Amino acid sequence: MSKRQSKSMFTLSILISGSIFVQMGLYLISLISGSNLRFNIFEVCHNTLKLIGLTSLTYAVDILVIGTFLFALWKISTQIIQTVKMRRRLQQYSCESLTKEFNDQFKNRKKEFIIISYPVPVAITMGFISPKIVLSTGLLNLLSEEELEAVIYHETYHLNNHDPLKIFLLSINSVTLPYIPILKWFNEKYRVIQEVMADELAIEKQETALHIGSALMKMLKVGKLETKSFAYASFAETSVNYRIEHILNPLKNTHIKVPVIITMWSILVFSLISIFFIYALA
């Protein structure tokens, strides 16, 4: 696993989904304005189906495009609403003195730490534009000073890499374009790699895997919090098996194999869309 792999997965996911969403957007513009966009692949599909006598299927294209956009808007709106609600809850639980202490201790002028008075151990990074590291008093009471430091290094990696935003974008791509299954695979494996990379940062900074490993085991024993419906990067909820294996044997290079069938199917679907586009250009 490497950061280069995660960057490649994120970039490919954005390129694949972005090209499709652009075409769908052009198609919607043509529907609303009544104009004929010659270079739009969905318009070509629509006209081709009419030409061969499958008029009823042309409505399926309309439903696919409109339904995809509406579903994407709904998912985005839900995320925004849930994030706003969570921020309000954090304000209620916020411990101002500890929050100031942590930001001062780590010389954080951007105030990237939020400490909440909550008995359950919580260590997450949330926020799209200005991400924050949220730690609970339950976590502070559970971990030793070295273990807490390891968790902070871990979450700092997610914060600096803007993982909450990237996880959100990958999630939107995978759920709104299910006919390209490689996007779902990218979403799942990106999270795995980023968690391992975050652990590696803690191991590198502390020059030992002991503290990050013991912190992870303590949080797993306590149990995780209820599932949250907004995009975030959590310390002890993702890729646990991979992380434990890597912590126990950090020199071992665990390879993530690209699934052949899923890749071939995704290439086939994307190629068909590209063929329609080339036909339109011709």
Image: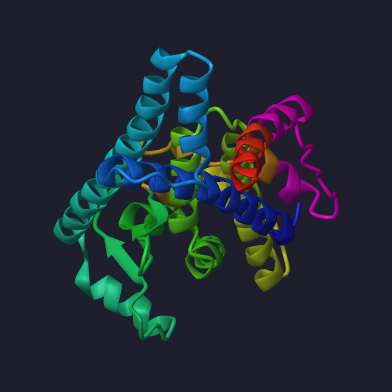
Q: Residue at 81% across / 49% down in the picture?
A: 249
Q: Is 175 above or below relative to 252?
A: above
Is residue 211 at all visible to an observer of this figure?
Answer: no
Judging depth in this view, the residue of 261 and 88 nearest the camera is: 261
Residue nearer the viewer, 231 or 225? 231
Residue drawn at x 71%, y 69% is 204
Measured along the vertical axis of the image, is residue 25 above or below residue 206?
above
The quarter of the rendered structure image containing the C terminus is top right
**Within the image, what quadrant is residue 126 found in?**
bottom left
Where is residue 185 drawn, in percent x and y?
Answer: 62, 36
Please name the colour scheme applied to the rendered image: rainbow
Q: Position of residue 76 (x, y in %)?
A: 31, 46
Quarter occupied by residue 127: bottom left
Is residue 157 at all visible to an observer of this figure?
Answer: yes
Residue located at (36% from left, 86% from top):
109
Residue 184 sits inside the magenta stretch: no
Q: Is residue 91 left or right of residue 135?
A: left
Q: Is residue 75 left or right of residue 212?
A: left
Q: Position of residue 153 (x, y in %)?
A: 55, 67
Residue 123 found in image quarter: bottom left
The number of numbered discs placed on residues in the rendered structure image is 0
Q: Single out the residue that lies furthest toward the right.
A: 252
Q: Residue at x 41, y 54 (%)?
A: 124
Residue range in magenta is 244-269
Above or below: residue 176 compared with residue 93:
above
Tell whether position 264 is magenta: yes
Left or right: 101 in relation to 232: left
Which residue is at the front of the view, 227 or 202? 227
Answer above or below: position of 74 versus 127.
Answer: above
Instruction: Indicate the position of residue 207 as horizontal and vertical percent values.
Output: 73, 69
